[in-house]
Every structure is written in structure tokens, then in C-alpha cells.
Amino acid sequence: MICSLAGPPAQLSGTEVKVTGLQIHTFGFAHTDRDGQRVHWESGAARDVLHYLLCFPAGRRREELLSDLWNTDDERGGKNRFRVTLHRLRAALARPDAVIEDDGRYALHPEVLGASDVGRFYSALSRFERAGDPQQRRAALEQATGLYRGDFLSGQTAGWVNEAREEHQAAYVRANLELSLLRCDARECQASAQSLASALHTDPFVGENYHQRLMACVSRVEGKYAATEHYRRFAAFLSEQLGDTPMPETVDLAQRIKCGEAPCFLETAPHQGLAQPVAGLCPLLPGSRCSQALSEALQLN
């Protein structure tokens, strides 16, 4: 698979490859554009091969592809089907070299991979990890999170799609948490909150500590009533989804807020990574003063 935030493959070196005329979108509504025009796939199998190879930038052997996509092999006509499908894929992209073969492994040409949103997503994350300057790190994360416009190949249920989707989702959540820290350090509370809200909306189970921080920040920005409502919504979410209750420290924090305390995690400890507090003003409240986008993002599933 393309792998997590911690280690993009060699094909995604962090130097974004720009391909004039070709744009492959897989996050959210999946579609491919060539020279500004939508590619209308005459062969669904060709489109499936494109999406499949996006999940395996290091390449796959023909027998693996035949088995995963069509549950067949060379002896059952798979070899000829594979040859015809590759021809149709190359024709649809107007690139005879769209799929390259090396030592029995078939992979997308690096320029084709670079024309995909998933390729650019991981290239941006790679640049983030190598950058030392906070502004460069932030710019890379902003590009990455901006590319993620929904689940990878939404609606498809094949095992190879689900595995890739989970990896991309985890990378997106982590990227938003990292971006939230950088924005918070810059005292950009609204932007920091949006990043944190996006992470929690994508994965509400990412960590109760983040919900604690939301409660604290809401108590300062919206007041104790809004913060308490946030706590109650989170408690209801835990009960409905897990049959569980908030941790004792979360309950204690809620009680302190009810008594009028307005804690701020950022004031008590500097950020040193994801294990440290993150600030924001992110209530799960449709009627709060936060922006509509933030309010919608914070509705737990």
C-alpha cells in the first residue's frame, strides 16, 4: 500500500511531479480529467486497474492483479484480458507508458502517479516530514489536507480499496492534528480548531484527550455552558457507540468547568508533538459562534 504518514514510498519522493493535462481524483468523487475534459471510461476494467495500481505504487505482479481484481489467472483467460485492459488504460490516458513493467511487476509511471491526488497527498506529507522551517511544514500540511476531499474511492468495497482507504484516512487525521498544533502555536485559534475538528470528524475515536482539550478551550471561548454541552454530547457518543463512559479525568474536567474554571492547555504546557495539548474552540454545537464549516465538521457520526 501507499503507506502511512511516516513513510511514503520512494516513488513519492516529496518533489511534486506536475503532469500537464492529466488529473486523477480519488478522494471523494472519483474521476479523471485529461486536457480539461472528463475521461469517460469505455472500459470499467481499465479504470479499476488504474485505481488498483494507485494503491500499490511499488507495482504488482500480473497474477496478483488478476486475482485481486477479477479472481482469475492466466490459465482462465486472464493473461489476454490483462493485455487488452492495459491497452485500453493507456489509450484512455493518452500515454503509452502509463503502466510500466519492470522485472515482472507492473506499476504506474511516476508522472501518472504524480498526477493523482493521492500521489500529491503523500508527496506533501513527505515534504512536511523533511522540512525544518515551521512555515514550510505548515504549507505542506495545508496542501495535503486540502487534497483530501472525502474517502478514497468512496462506495467501493473491495478489500484492497478498504485497506488503502484506512491508511489514507489515518494519514489525513494525523496531518490535521499536526496542522492544528502549528496553527495553535501561531495563535490562530479558528484555523487550529478547524484542523482539529476535521480530524475528530473523520475519526471521533482518535483520542479522548483531544475532546478534553476541546472542552477546556470551549470554556474559554464560548463559556462554561457550551463546554458542558460539548461534554454531554461526547458522553452520549461514547454511550451510544461503545457502551462506555468518559474517563475520570474527563468527568473531573467537566466538573471544574461547571464550577466556573476556564482552563487552557496551551498556557500550562508548550506543544511538543501530538502527545501534547492542542488548543481550539471546537464545540460539538450547531448553534455555537464557530463557523458553519467548523460546526458541521464537529457533528460526531
Image (tube, rainbow, N blue to C red):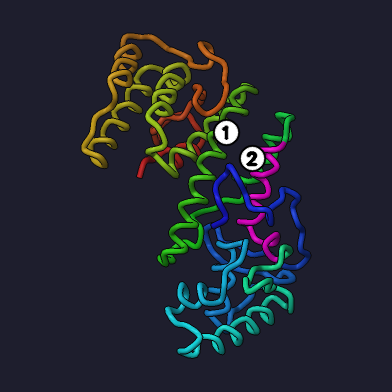
Q: Is residue 157 above or below residue 255?
A: below
Horizontal and vertical percent position of residue 166: 46, 52
Examine the residues drawn in magenta and state their main secondary structure.
helix
Q: Is residue 151 left or right of residue 14?
A: left
Q: Residue sitting at 35 percent across and 14 percent down?
A: 257
Amino acid at dot 2 = Leu
At label 1, counting other C-alpha atoms closer than 10 Å, the crowd grade (few under 14, some 14-19, many 20 or more) is: many
228 or 208: nearer the viewer: 208
In which image quadrant can residue 288 be found? top left
In which image quadrant can residue 105 be found? bottom right
Q: Is residue 276 above or below residue 132?
A: above
Does the segment drawn in magenta span residue 115? yes
Q: Which mark is residue 70?
A: none
Give the extent of the magenta segment.
112-130
The quadrant of the picture occupied by the C terminus is top left
Q: Residue sitting at 50 percent across and 62 percent down?
A: 153
Q: Which mark is residue 141?
A: 2
Instruction: Confirm or deny contact between disc 2 and disc 1 (CB under 8 A).
Output: yes
Residue 194 seen: no
For marks 2 and 1, the one nearer the N-term is 2
Q: Residue sitting at 72 percent across and 35 percent down?
A: 131
Tell me the residue that label 1 is attached to.
178
Amino acid at dot 1 = Glu
Q: Is residue 290 above or below residue 223?
A: below
Does the segment drawn in magenta span residue 181? no
Horizontal and vertical percent position of residue 295: 45, 37
